[in-house]
Image (cartoon, rainbow, N blue to C red):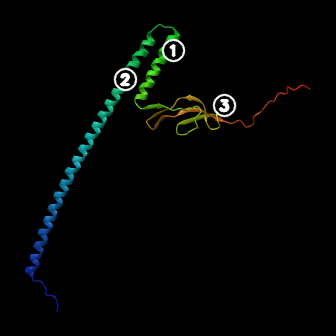
Amino acid sequence: MTPKKPTKKELEKRVEELEKELQTTAEQGAKYLNQLKYTKADLENVQKQNQKRLGEVIERANGELLEKLLPLIDELEILSTRNAEKQKLVEGVKMVHNKLLKLAESEGIKQIDSVGEKFDPFKHEAIMEVKTLDVPDGCVAEEIRRGYMFKDKVLRASVVKVAKAPDVVEIKIEDNQDE
């Protein structure tokens, strides 16, 4: 049995159904495309708002930190305009230094301890090796410039001299025996 050939009327009806289906699919595709465009525009607006808010938060945080620095600036100004003895100026500068360190610590900054510690290339910047027996080999013998960390991130590495054991150690033995 061979399949029956569709009639012209059946073919026209099928073409009409397919054209309607195509039109419906095209309308649905246009609707989805329009929704996608609106969603994309909404996303871009949200991103712009978030960037603006982030900028405002950063600006406010910087302002608060700078406001905390103002008393230190005032104290340094007073110290620089006073006609005081050298010792009192030194004491004043030390006081301001200590206040600044406390402020930095309150904001999450810590000093890196270096002298006597094992050399760590992530926290220390070695400028030279020093031959010594006072500090173990490979440890920091002297700190030239202090380093600082903010939370777990190194802001500035400590500039250090690293101990190295001398090649030969001379031992002098005095002979105090009577002959």
Q: Sequence order check: which comes first, mark 2 or mark 1?
A: 2
Name which quarter of the figure residue 28 lies in.
bottom left
**Within 10 Å of the Cα at label 3, are there few (<14), some (14-19), or many (20+) other Cα atoms?**
few
The answer for how far apart the CA atoms under marks 2 and 1 are is 22 Å
Depicted 95 relative to depicted 126: above or below: above
Camera-nearest residue between 157 and 22: 157
**What is the x, y in percent for residue 59?**
32, 31
Which quadrant is home to the C terminus? Answer: top right
11 w.r.t. 107: above or below: below
User: The residue under label 3 is which amino acid type?
Assistant: Asp
Residue 175 percent location from the top left of the image: 85, 27
Which of the 4 image quarters holds residue 44? top left
According to the image, label 2 marks what residue? Answer: 68
Mark 2: amino acid:
Lys
Report the residue at 43% width, 36% height from top. 151
Q: Nearer the viewer, residue 53 or 29?
A: 53
Asked if 129 appears above or below 11 in the picture, the reply is above
Name the side, left or right, on which 149 lies relative to 63: right
Q: Residue at horizontal 55%, vertical 36%?
A: 124
The residues tagged by marks 3 and 2 sit, at their Cα atoms, a distance apart of 41 Å
Q: Position of residue 6 (x, y in %)?
A: 12, 83
- Would you identify the image quadrant in which residue 118 lies? top right
Given the current orientation, which residue lies at the most extreme bottom position? 1
Residue where numbered disc 1 is placed: 90
As drawn, the label of residue 134 is: 3
Mark nearer the N terminus (3 vs 2): 2
